[in-house]
Amino acid sequence: MSILPSDLQPPFAHFMGMIFTTVTPDLVRAEMPVREEFRNRTGVMHGGAIMALADNLGGTGATANLREGQSTATIESKTNFFASIPIGDVAIAEAIPLHRGRTTMVWQTRITRRDGKLAAIVTQTQLILSEK
C-alpha cells in the first residue's frame, strides 16, 4: 500500500511520465513509458532519463522515511548501465534502502525493461535536512 500518492510527486515526475505503483518506507516501485523525447543519438532511451527516474525514486523513498519538518536532497549518485531500453518500451524501476541513518540514506534502484532484462542500477545518497 502506498503512503505517498502520485499526486504528491514533484512536477518533474509528472513531466517525465512516472507512474508510481508502490511507495512505502521499504520499497518504491514505478514505471515510465519510454517516449520518443527520451531518444539518444543511438535511438534508445537516454541515460539521463534513466538516471532521472532513479533519482526521483530514491528521493521518494527517502521522503517516505522522513520525520515531520525534515526534507531530503540527493548529494551523490552512481549509475551502472547494462542494457539499453528501446523507445516505446517501459522502464520499470524498484528502489530499496541500503542504509537509513540519522543524517543520510542510501537507496539502490534497479531499472529493467518490460522483458525483465536489467538495464541499470543506480545507487544514491540522500542528505537528511532538518527545519531550522
Image: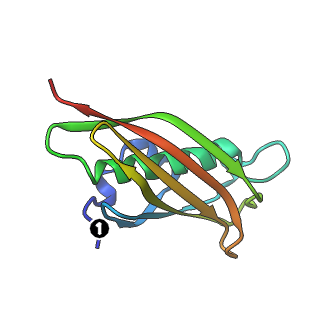
Q: Nearer the viewer, residue 112 or 5?
A: 112
Residue type for callout 1 = Ser
Q: Name the residue rendered at 29%, 60% in the picture.
A: 5
Expressed as whole percent of the image width and height from the top left, the position of residue 107 reads 46, 51
Classify 128 as above or below 35.
above
Whether residue 124 sits left or right of residue 89 in the image: it is left
Residue 77 vertical position relative to residue 61 in the rendered view, above or below: above
Which residue: 30% across, 36% down?
A: 103
> Residue 126 sits in which quadrant?
top left
Q: Does residue 14 appear in the picture of this structure?
A: no
Q: Residue at x 40, y 46 (%)?
A: 59
Q: Position of residue 41 (x, y in %)?
A: 83, 42
- Label 1, on which residue? 2
Q: Residue at x 30, y 60 (%)?
A: 25
Categorize mark 1 by other alpha carbons within 10 Å: few (<14), some (14-19), many (20+). Answer: some
State the image quarter where residue 112 is shown.
bottom right
Residue 21, given in percent of the width and then of the height, sits at 41, 69
User: In this figure, which colouring scheme has been used for the structure?
Assistant: rainbow
Residue 16 visible (yes or no): yes
The image quarter in which residue 35 lies: bottom right
The quadrant of the rendering that contains the C terminus is top left
Residue 104 location in percent, x, y?
36, 39
> Which is nearer the eye, 33 or 58?
58
- Quadrant containing the N terminus is bottom left
Residue at the outermost top position: 132
Label 1: element kind:
loop
